[in-house]
Image (cartoon, grey):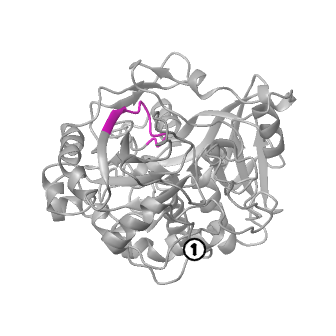
Amino acid sequence: MKYTSYDLIVIGSGFASTFFLKKYLSKAPSTAKILVLERGHLYPHAERVKEKRGEATAFASLNPLAIDTFENTNDSKDWHFSIGFGGGSNCWFGCTPRFLPSDFKMKTLYGVGNDWPVSYDDLDPYYTEVEDLMSISGPADTPFRRTKPYPQPPHLFTAVDKKLKKEYGNKYISQPTARSRVAVNGRGVCCASTVCNVCPVNAKFTIENSNLNVYEDPRVEIEYGAAVYSLELVQNMARKVNFVKDNKELQIGGEVIALGTNPFFNANILLNSGDTNPHTGKGVGEQLGMQVHVYLDDMQSVGGSTWVNANGYMLYDGDHRKDYAACLMESSNEPFFRPESGKWRNMASFRMVFEDLPDPDNYISTTGDRLKPKVHFKGHSEYTLKGVEAMKKSLPKVLSCLPVEKIIYKDAYPSEAHILGATRMSNSAAGGVVDKLLIHHQYRNLFVLGSGSFTTFSPANPTLTLSALSMYSADHAF
């Protein structure tokens, strides 16, 4: 490290950290000193592709497996994420719908959960900015308000998508996605091979291929292999960061500190630091997802240009959210075949994704290993499970415009790979950990970024929203 103290220290290099830095750098002076502490290492895309092909690469052993970095008390619940430079951008699938305006007002509109301290209108310009920076592909007509077209044209529909689009208009849309429809910034065109966690043609936006020039900025210094475990908190300020690198105990000071790891580790760092906010670590969770296969009579599901072709909002918003969870439909275009001769493609497949509400009985605690949090998850809420049952009753009518023979409901997935909650936003410390700018209610030079801040858990994919929140935070705080 070049200095003994920095103007800004950021922990992590995923979406939350990178978009926070992007906005911060646009406002910071040329003399600013910024340090990024990344637990993992750069694992270049070309080397990831080699590993997928079964070829040897020295990079494969640099970063720990996610499963080895935390303790899981629930064997039936999986949690998926990635350690290393770029964080979740290395393993995400590139789905980028916005939240609906109602998602931010669950208490006011439906009497459940709590309202977010920020509104859709607050985030709208930052949604647009992130969509531009990611070169998002998306449609002109959407169920959420937009003030500017998407940078890239929408992906193509399958035959089934076309029928549903005709029936439901802007409640059934080409999914907004960071999987390129046209080549851009060195990224290829989505090949629809559905191996998106390591895109074979580098079509998916990642921090590595982003061209954001954040980590190339001369004001930014990045330390790899720096495992942060706590902060030094003094007189309601975060003064220093404690971490391990090359088996050495190190400490570095900063005027402003931003935690940008995933919700498990942000909470673990705060708890190890002595944060006494009663909500720290509480309410961790994610959405619930399940697959539905639909057998069709004399209709083939063919066409499309990406993995998730479309989003259906027919079961998403409305007064039913007073009683049970919203459901977002994802039209899957993965390779699937109906196991009947002559009807191989006479089926459609949808992933049904349900919102959830934070539950204090789902929480993070510390362990004897200061780098390894323990995750306690008792299960999804009754609110969510009622949403699943309501979907099963409603889906036949929703799909009545198709020649449906049979609907097969699969078991819920053990993970949606969207870790949410544990440091939620609120108007005061009585209701959460951070304020609307993602600043800790007590430690006013400490930002806690990412999806841990979500007040409630919309069924929509979280990455676009957490990135927009980071830009909103940096824009208003500096």
| Disc 1 secondary structure class | helix
Q: What is the magenta range? A: 408-419
Q: Hey, which quadrant is residue 82 in on the image?
A: top right
Residue 256 in view of the camera: no
Position of residue 451 measured from the top left corner of the image (x, y, whole percent): 46, 50
Residue at the bottom extreme of this rendering: 147
Residue 262, relative to residue 403: is it above or below? above
Q: Which of 338 and 426 is in front in this view?
A: 338
Tell whether position 144 is magenta: no
Tell whether position 416 is magenta: yes
Residue at the spot 53% in from the left edge and 50% down from the top edge = 333
Q: Nearer the viewer, residue 44 or 453?
A: 44
Residue at the spot 75% in from the left edge and 69% down from the top edge = 184
Position of residue 19 measured from the top left corner of the image (x, y, whole percent): 61, 61
Position of residue 203 measured from the top left corner of the image (x, y, whole percent): 71, 57
Position of residue 450 measured from the top left corner of the image (x, y, whole percent): 50, 51
Query: Which quadrant does the C terminus fall into?
Result: bottom right
Q: Name the residue under label 1.
A: 129
Circle 1 crowding by C-alpha within 10 Å: few under 14, some 14–19, many from 20: some
Q: What residue type is labelled 1?
A: Glu
Q: Hey, which quadrant is residue 386 in on the image?
A: top left
